Image (tube, coloured by chain):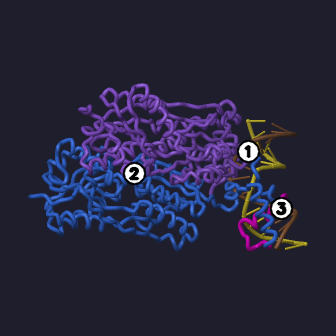
Chain colours: A purple, B blue, C brown, D yellow
Amino acid sequence: MPVTIKDVARVAGVSPSTVSRALTTPALVQAETRARVERAAAELGYQPNRAARGLITGRTGNIGLIVPDLTNPFFPGVVKGVQSRARESDFSVFLADTDEDPSAEAGLVRALSKQVDGIVLCSPRMTEEDLRSVIGETPVVMLNRRVGQIPAITIDNIDGIRQAVAHLAALGHRRIGYVAGPRLSWSNRERARALRTTTNAAGIDLVEIGNFAPQFAGGVAAADLVLAAGVTAVIAYNDLVALGLLNWFATRGVKVPEAISVMGFDDIVLSQMVSPSLTTVAQPQEQIGRAGVDMLLQLLEDPDRAAAARRELPSQLMVRHSTGRAPSN
Amino acid sequence: MPVTIKDVARVAGVSPSTVSRALTTPALVQAETRARVERAAAELGYQPNRAARGLITGRTGNIGLIVPDLTNPFFPGVVKGVQSRARESDFSVFLADTDEDPSAEAGLVRALSKQVDGIVLCSPRMTEEDLRSVIGETPVVMLNRRVGQIPAITIDNIDGIRQAVAHLAALGHRRIGYVAGPRLSWSNRERARALRTTTNAAGIDLVEIGNFAPQFAGGVAAADLVLAAGVTAVIAYNDLVALGLLNWFATRGVKVPEAISVMGFDDIVLSQMVSPSLTTVAQPQEQIGRAGVDMLLQLLEDPDRAAAARRELPSQLMVRHSTGRAPSN
DNA sequence: TTGAAAGCGTTACCAG
DNA sequence: CTGGTAACGCTTTCAA
């Protein structure tokens, strides 16, 4: 029922081959013939069948995107970036959500790999072993994780933490807490490590608390531990955790920032929607997504040259009310 | 390079036809042969090429999902539902985000339609005319909108509004505001209409304010108008708008719920993360997504019988702090 | 119950 | 510059 290349060929009075060329390699066909083909195609509303094309070219025009949890507002930002960048190059996006289940990741990659030209793996939690086995089979770009030479987009966690600590130090804090995220999260390990060296260099005491789930509930769960730690400021693994802290502090009657300063990481939109608004380190979410697709497309063009590509995006401290003033002590 | 059906056939010592049958219509092949094929397939890690299969069966095993804006936390919930239900039936999901641009919707549907068996259209804003033209070409299930006999999943907006108004009435409110959402949104029109009849029946004054963008900024923009309207309670088109109101009220020093009660709609996770937590009407987001896929799959099975399908899910008032106590007046 | 062959819509290759 | 033919990986007749 749908119109095929043969229909167009018949209407244009040429062979299917010529139609194919006219539409995909216009330079190879006479201007007049091309015009005739284009007219016929438009008239019939012809849309090439991508599956058929992919069968022979080996290119599907699709990319896969795997995220841990769409419910964490950080990821939709990334997804939008991937989406819009992909569409610019006429790629479609397969989306899969692993529900924070590391064991599902590898399977999903394998399932998707047959239908896509490459995969953007967002914040993968899987083991390095799984990772390596999986990237052997399909072009993959990782977001928010760096493992060896695997193509990856990351942000500058170290500098982000540096900015955060400098801010707290300037406010006079001498003892701060860190509510850690998932043990398997690369970002978490990076941030924790940066925090240790930075606070150490600044002569600030660091109390590490956790690990906790990278969600609101994780922050709620951590809140009392934070209070017990005797810190005047706390940095949470991400904004969601920070919001959980904020919320529990509010119900406990602990004033923020008067009694304790709170900082997040990510700059999800929510962080400006709460009061006090949340001081946080911004990750350019859409840009991360776009950069991931950029790199993947390069990788598809030229597997060798791009294979070594890694790119680090800047992070940016956003000072807001939750660290608004220095504590008295 | 990838392993094809022929490879499996060779290893199993049978013909490709038999492999195909063993894997897709096991009943048609002898138990022993089938076992041999399955062993070979597993050993080689064979994954059928869906594109090739689709070429001949006319089924892609993919569904398309189009949402207005992934950044509104309502939609990720729906996407997760679609995702997980689709995966249960071995379907993959193409995702597209229109960025709240109604004119992009029809084009996206057309672009996707060649690559999918059907499309789930979430909260479409496009005109009825576009809608009808588009559904003529591809199986479509709408979410959160009802137009004629087009298959659709909706929630019971009327009952949701009824519960909301009853709650406010019980608290003693006699004059309430409604911050309207997008003019083109079906949900918005439904809620506004329900609000008129319900408040009218209860002898409550209704002040309609807006339209505003269905986002945090929309609520911020509406807040002063709400204060000027002299209402003791306000219902926002959705939670995001309500959060915008809450935020602006906070900066204005207007106490919620003491000075004014605020209600949202949707029950996005955020609504429990702010303080005061937001009273809202819950829409079962994942369930909406799942129901949409359910209906789409039915529709694919049996286009005639299911074509008339429409399903309405219940909505549920969630009372929280933002309407916590009755106003004194 | 199994195999051979045709064909899905497209592009690539080779003549002309 | 264009047409014919083969091939992509799979399923589906049709015979055996």
Q: How far is disc 1 from disc 2 in space, using C-alphas?
A: 48 Å
Q: Nearer the viewer, mark 3 or mark 1?
A: 3
> In this picture, which residue range is highlighted in magenta?
B9-30
Identified by mark 3, the residue type is Ala
User: Disc 2 marks which amino acid?
Assistant: Pro
Q: Which mark is residue B12?
A: 3
- Foreground mark, 1 or 2, reads 2
Q: Residue at x 39, y 26 (%)?
A: A203
* Mark 2 neighbour class, 10 Å CA radius: few under 14, some 14 to 19, many 20 or more: many
Q: Residues under labels 2 and 3: Cα distance?
A: 50 Å
Examine the rendering and report whether any part of residue B168 can be seen: yes
Q: Residues within 10 Å of mark 3 (few under 14, many from 20)?
A: many
- B175 relative to A258 in the view: left or right: left
Residue B273 percent across, percent down from the top left: 33, 51
Question: Taking B211 as reference, is A158 left or right?
Answer: right
In the structure shown, which secondary structural element does the residue marked by tag 3 occupy?
Answer: helix
Q: Chain of mark 2?
A: B
Q: Chain of mark 1?
A: A
Q: Position of residue A147 (x, y in %)?
A: 60, 37
Up-down relation of residue A258 to residue B235 (above or below): above
Query: Quick one: SS at disc 1?
Result: helix
- Which mark sits nearer the N-terminus, 2 or 3? 3
User: Which label is found at residue B35?
Assistant: none
The one nearer the camera, C11 or A239, is A239
Question: Could you tell me if the residues under marks 1 and 2 are in contact, i.e. CB atoms within 8 Å?
Answer: no
Which residue position holds label 2? B73
Q: Do residues under tags 2 and 3 come within 8 Å of each other at their CB atoms?
A: no
B67 within the magenta span: no
Q: Is residue A103 left or right of residue A284?
A: right
Reading the image, the residue beneath label 1 is A17
Q: Specify whether disc 3 shares its chain with disc 1.
A: no
